[in-house]
Image (cartoon, coloured by chain):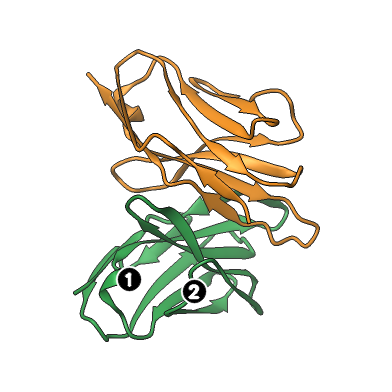
Amino acid sequence: DADVTQTPRNRITKTGKRIMLECSQTKGHDRMYWYRQDPGLGLRLIYYSFDVKDINKGEISDGYSVSRQAQAKFSLSLESAIPNQTALYFCATSDLRVYNEQFFGPGTRLTVL
Amino acid sequence: AQTVTQSQPEMSVQEAETVTLSCTYDTSENNYYLFWYKQPPSRQMILVIRQEAYKQQNATENRFSVNFQKAAKSFSLKISDSQLGDTAMYFCAFMLISNFGNEKLTFGTGTRLTIIP
């Protein structure tokens, strides 16, 4: 089984809809991250969490919110989706003691029509 | 803020040849890590190699090696004896090491590498 899983893997939604992307990990890591990948822009950090009670904004947090429900779960929500949020979204985790490697999930392809 | 620049959007090379991907970065700090990630068509992000800034010796992982030039803020990836499975998007990334434990990755825009049979 994969250590970092994301659901759904692909999602098509309409403008204005609320959508949640979920990330779960079995690695026992404290730190979790959400990134967005756009063609020509690389990956950009949306939000990150270093433990269950810690939530931090990243580079591009506007229009997004997150919830760290447990050490193993970190969800990303789009409150009112818009077409320019169409992108590939990645969840990642890292260990507090070995912070110099992040482990990525398989990604969620989101299309907002 | 740190920035990472990959100036080669696309590259292609014949199978078995050697190819070098370029990356430059900008920081005023001394303590950091640099990474190369590979993203094949499956879109999974895979760590290829990492370099600690305080180490002068260039990192090597099998066919993959880096040329780390700290003064020039350059971090290129060399792939030797390239294989069809090396076809992927390659991202250079930077992580500043801080006393506050808030390390984050900053990515470049990527280089799409195609290995030609």
Q: From the image, which quarter does the N terminus of chain A lie in? A: bottom left
Residue furthest to the right: B99
Q: Residue at x 66, y 42 (%)?
A: B33
Q: In the figure, is residue B68 to the left or right of B65?
A: right
Q: Is residue A46 left or right of residue B31?
A: left
Q: What amino acid type should be assigned to the residue bearing mark 1?
A: Gln
Give the chain coloured orange: B
Point out residue B26 in the picture as x, y percentages from the top left corner. Answer: 62, 44
Name the secondary structure under disc 1: helix
Query: How far across and how far down the image is residue B101, in percent?
Result: 74, 60
Q: Secondary structure at mark 2?
A: loop
Question: Is disc 2 surrounded by few (<14), some (14 to 19) or many (20+) residues within 10 Å?
Answer: some
Q: Which residue is mark 1?
A: A85
Q: Which residue is mark 2?
A: A61
Residue in view at x 72 percent, y 47 percent:
B28
N-terminal of the pair, mark 1 or mark 2, is: 2
